[in-house]
Amino acid sequence: MPEAVTSVTFTLNGTPVTVPADGCSLLEALRDRLGVRSPKDGCSPQGQCGCCTVWVDGQPRVACVTPVARVAGRVVTTVEGLAEADEWADRLCAAGGSQCGFCTPGIVMRLAAIEPDRRDDTAVRQALLAHLCRCTGWNSVVEAACGGAHQPVERDLAAAEVRAALEGHAAQHVSPAVALGRGGFAADTAPADALVAVRTADGEWMVADTLVEARQLAGKVQGRRTTEPLAWPIELPEGDWVRTLQTTWVEPAYLEPDSAWCLPGGEPVGPLTNGGAFGGKTGEPEVAAVARRLAAQHGRPVVVSYSREDVVRLGAKRPPVAAGIREDGNGVVRVARTPGIAAAIRSVAPGLVVEEVDVAGPPTSAHIRAAGWAEAAILLAPADGWVTAPNRARVRAEVRGDGSVHVDVQCGQVLDEVVLRSYCIGAAHMALGWVRHEGVTVGAGGVPRDLTIRSFGVVRAVDTPAIEVAISDDGGEPVNGSDAVFAAVALAVWRHDGFAARWPTMRT
């Protein structure tokens, strides 16, 4: 009988390394055994987001679904071993092709695998089919890849971080290092000897020395995408409406799953260490409280992370609405009962009657990007296209005949045009998905049935049109502009598509 294999040896960034053959994935071996944390665990592990992409023998591969045993004797490369990594970091930072930076190390590894003379728009967008990005709207990533030789750009990165914090509603670093995954995410900064906690389907937390052990103890089952159709949970109010709109459950779809870690007796780190997930992580995070409790219980540091399935089941969604508007601009908005949502709607449309209704489904939040007020502004459909946000930012958007999107933005002092433009493109991309593609199927008991990150309908790079952003600096106080872009582009797309009564229009 052959001896059992107890270890796996491979070459990592030019150095031979050995890890235990304990059934872990290549991603876990890199992050938790070898301390290489540029590859990220975004889909936990569904092999669908591309955040963990590395090279195996020079070819891109997603590490989360690659057993480490399969790379025995082979050569693995991460951004730490990529000769041109710094150039890619500079390119992405200069183009605004990285915001939080969670997905970009994997994107860098994918793009760097394309021969330089083949890096045109078509080839780059095709390569990006293996990836998801919620922040940038793809076009700035494509620009970074296809822009020729990098030319340094003089920027005030401190001012850029102020603009990024305004747009993301949370502190965010801006530097080339962020594009290489060094944004300081909670799961990346946890001590090497930290225990790992994984949530069971019943809400308990299983703690072990390794992720593979914790998942086995928790009985983690891979999430699936349902074949059931979308549903619109709120009935339209009766009335003599000139326009009506019903929306469904929408997943914020941030790429970094909620994570936190804590030392015994200390304060937890995370999950808002670099970027705010567009409001999706606002509030009292369960993972932080659990990390504090488990660290005290075990007398050791503990890192606590949601799986992608946990994020979908437990994370806050955009509240569904059903609304009607009369010729005079008044009307009724029915919305899933959500703290703060009525005030958000009335902040831009005081003439609308708001009816909050109880709906069986996942939790909702008024902190999600422009929740409530965007729907109200869109329903009013101003003839000139200008949308004014509660903070007085003004944006007008147009969908042109070739499908491209033009956006005019006024939001005070620009501070940093690269960051503001990147956020505006990302918001336009999100609006396109919201109107046309995005939704989560929720079962009769109110539990989400779509549990894979690809099932949410986030628009792919190959399907993202050109998005042109014109920014006017009026010298006023700088305010968030991308939330107004989100609303204005959604209005422009809705108008262009004929004011369809249900969103997403292309999945009805």
Image (tube, rainbow, N blue to C red):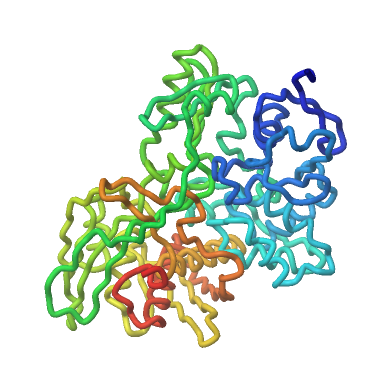
- Foreground pick, 87 / 436: 436
Does 150 appear above or below 310?
below
Residue located at (29% from left, 59% from top): 320
Q: Position of residue 177 (x, y in %)?
A: 70, 46
The relative height of residue 489 versus residue 26 in the rendered view (above or below) is: below
Q: Nearer the viewer, residue 435 or 91?
A: 435
The outermost residue toward the front is 1
Q: Position of residue 27 (x, y in %)?
A: 66, 37
Q: Is residue 348 above or below residue 402?
A: above
Image quarter (top left, top right, bottom left or bottom right) of the N terminus: top right
Q: Residue 21 at x, y = what percent?
A: 71, 25
Q: Quadrant of residue 133?
A: bottom right
User: Can see residue 394?
Assistant: no
Which residue is pictured at 58% across the width and 63% down the height? 422
Asked if 216 appears above or below 408 in the picture, the reply is: above
**In the picture provided, is 316 more to the left or to the right than 190?**
left
Q: How many marks?
A: 0
307 vs 22, left or right, is left
Q: Point out the image quarter for the C terminus.
A: bottom left
Query: From the viewer's perspective, is 416 left or right of 203?
Result: right
| Residue 36 x/y as whole percent | 71, 34
Q: Point out the residue furthest to the bottom here.
A: 401
Task: Decide if residue 325 is in sight here.
Answer: yes
Residue that appears at 52% across and 81% down: 403
Res 501 → quadrant? bottom left
Front in this rendered view, residue 501 or 295: 501
Residue drawn at the location 59% of the way across and 41% of the way down = 41
